[in-house]
Amino acid sequence: MNTSEKRQEILNAALELIAEQGFHGAPIASIAEHAGVGAGTIYRYFETKDLLINTLFQELHDKIHTGLMEGYNADRPVRERFIRAHTALLRFFIANPLQFRFLEQYFHSPYGAIFHRDQIFGQRGSEDLYRMLLEEGKARQIVKDLPLVVLFALAFGPLLTVARDHILGFVELDETLLVQTVQACWDGIKQ
Amino acid sequence: MNTSEKRQEILNAALELIAEQGFHGAPIASIAEHAGVGAGTIYRYFETKDLLINTLFQELHDKIHTGLMEGYNADRPVRERFIRAHTALLRFFIANPLQFRFLEQYFHSPYGAIFHRDQIFGQRGSEDLYRMLLEEGKARQIVKDLPLVVLFALAFGPLLTVARDHILGFVELDETLLVQTVQACWDGIKQ
DNA sequence: GTTATGGGAGTGAATATTCATTCCGACCAT
DNA sequence: ATGGTCGGAATGAATATTCACTCCCATAAC
């Protein structure tokens, strides 16, 4: 196992443990064991545990962001772009339950609070697909005239909740249901 | 300070600390200090820390449930009942930020996972206002024909997200905006 | 009326456990 | 051999829980 693989093993082990058991269930000792390395080795790759976790988040965030951007076409109507992006996102969560659960834990921990603030106020917005989409929808009076934050809540609240319920096994989200859910999210924000 | 007041002081201190700083920021020592009692005293009132936290949740849950039930009138149309209940709920969250933040922490911790399962599968459903409401709405074809779990997600997802954003100061949810938000939740689930 | 006695409530220092982080000897590849 | 890489026991800080003790007050004994 070369250096780069070992780094990845550590990240995977952390992802899996945090996703399945939360931060409480992921002490360094367990992460090391799951990754098949010694506890000390982790510190050769990551300065601190916090940094390990933030790296995990950052890489995941980038992966999702580029994934969403791939299918994006600024020439299509607002509604279509929204449905496309939202469907892709929900599909991603369903297909990657560990990643989803990790993100959930992350956002609801001291780590996540910081990010949320940036997401909403930060410069980062300029590169944010959804922000552009919703702003344009508002301007064209296709989307309700509500503050961006509220529109975000209406669009993402149901999506995240339904993804969690599927992953926890409370509902089987097949293709039909998935499309209907995204449609219902749109119903919430459309004018 | 009599015995019952002291118990309440302990619960209040725990609520406040957990709401403001999460479980990490609420060691027994801090709770004791905030409540103005010795650490040992807490164990005269609650067998373990877990039990203290579960008690806090249980009492809060009951309080909200009875609160919602008060304004309930089974004779009104489905839509009106939904809007009423949802408005009351959102108003409660806005008016009681500490309670809301505590609930959020609770649900996204090992404690909460257990409850969620009960909420959805449990016998508890028979007494659940929203469940009745949505079932009836589906039967009358006023509400989308989707699984109950998905309808829950559509109804509660945005509400909780928007409440959090308000409490964290990302948006000022005045009376108008509050009503519009609840209306948008309805748009998401209505046929 | 005064003093002794009992018990329940409260305390916080002591304990045991769990964790992130460090460190040093072993182990490899060159 | 020697440079770097690893592992996992050692460390120290933080934590929940316990326990030996103090305090207070009601009642009883005189």
Image (cartoon, coloured by chain):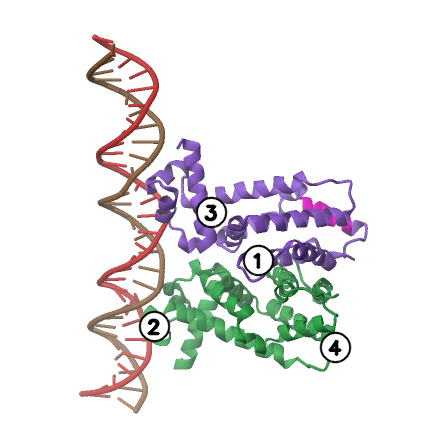
Chain colours: A green, B purple, C brown, D red
Q: Label 1: few (<14), some or many (≥20) within 10 Å? A: some
Q: Which residue is mark 2?
A: A43
Q: Disc 4: which chain?
A: A
Residue B133 within the segment the image draws in magenta: yes
* Label 4 neighbour load within 10 Å: few <14, some 14-19, many 20+: few
Q: Nearer the viewer, mark 2 or mark 4?
A: 4
Q: Which residue is mark 4?
A: A77
Q: Is the C-beta separation of discs 2 and 3 under 8 Å?
A: no
Residue ID for mark 1 = B166
Contact between marks 2 and 4 (CB within 8 A): the answer is no
Left or right placement of residue A25 versus residue B95 in this view: left
The alpha-carbon separation of the residues under discs 3 and 4 comes to 47 Å
**Residue farthest toward the right in the current orientation of the protein:** B140
Residue for badge 3: B15
Contact flag, marks 1 and 2 (Cβ < 8 Å): no
The N terminus of chain B appears in which quarter of the rendering?
A: top left
Residue B22 visible in image: no
Task: Give coordinates of residue C13: x percent, y percent.
Answer: 23, 44
| Numbered range of the magenta stretch | B129-137
- Secondary structure beneath dot 3 equals helix
Q: Mark 2 — on which chain does it sit?
A: A
Q: Please indicate whether residue D19 sits to the left or right of residue B145 in the image.
A: left
Residue B80 spot, x, y in % from top left: 75, 48
Q: Nearer the viewer, mark 1 or mark 2?
A: 1
Describe the element under mark 4 as helix, strand or loop. loop
Residue A52 is covered by the magenta coloring: no
Q: Earlier in the sequence, mark 2 or mark 4?
A: 2
Camera-near label (1 vs 3) is 1
- Distance in Å between CA atoms under marks 1 and 2: 39 Å
